[in-house]
Amino acid sequence: MRGADTRETEFAEFMVGRWPWLVRLAYALTGDWGHAEDLAQTAFTKALISWPRLRRADDPDAYLRRILLNANRSRFRKQRVPETGAAPQEQAVTVPDGTDELDQRSVLVAALMELPPRQRAVVALRYWDGLTETQTAAILGCSAGTVRSQASRALAKLRMSPHLHDGSTSR
């Protein structure tokens, strides 16, 4: 019984220390705080199941990121085909005046949601989470060159996103 208590305590400490970070990363992937918390909970549930292996990993955060990305991919696949067969509703996004950080973040997330899932994952890991190209490639299971090309394409799309422009034509 003592071993189970120790395991639960270790995992609880691991989870509490990483919860805010993982929810923020999930938010960068989903664009919705509710979905982000659900995704983080799913990732931690899977991490608990794999805890003996995870706690011995060289980089448990990378392992946890991988679990989160896989859970997000599964979520995205399930959402891809609407159950009703109807086209998804377009959501109106209000362009902020640029003074409110929360509005700016919402606009950025709206622009991120326009990216394909792979490009969104690259942007979230590279620029939101601050990983190197090599670290991002390892987590996504691709080459550093793929990360560079996906990041380049994503940034080009973000530069053209109407969500990130205030209506002026100057850059």
Image: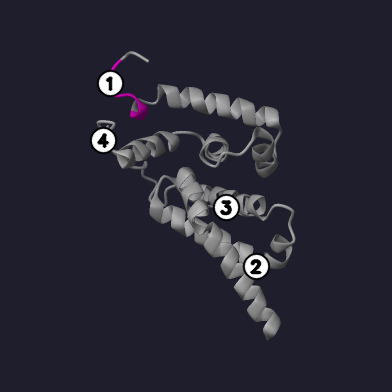
Query: Residue under circle 3?
Result: 68
Q: Secondary structure at mark 2?
A: helix
57 above or below 154?
Answer: below
Q: Secondary structure at mark 4?
A: loop
Residue type, label 4: Thr
Query: Residue under circle 4?
Result: 94
Mark 4–mark 2 Cα distance, whole angstroms, equals 42 Å
13 above or below 34?
Answer: below
Magenta stretch in the rendered image? 163-168
Q: Residue 76 appears at what percent x and percent y?
A: 51, 47
Q: Secondary structure at mark 3?
A: helix
- Identify the disc placed on residue 49: 2
Residue depicted at 66% across the width and 44% down the height: 139
Residue type, label 3: Leu
Q: Say which of 135 and 17 sits in front.
A: 17
Q: Residue 11 appears at what percent x and percent y?
A: 61, 68
Residue depicted at 39% across the width and 26% down the height: 161
Query: Residue under circle 1?
Result: 167
Q: Assess disc 1: are there few (<14), some (14-19) or many (≥20) residues with their C-alpha within 10 Å of its C-alpha.
A: few
Mark 2–mark 1 Cα distance, whole angstroms, equals 49 Å
Residue type, label 2: Ile
Looking at the image, residue 65 sits to the left or right of residue 96; the answer is right
39 above or below 140?
Answer: below
Mark 4–mark 1 Cα distance, whole angstroms, equals 12 Å
Q: Residue furthest bottom?
A: 1
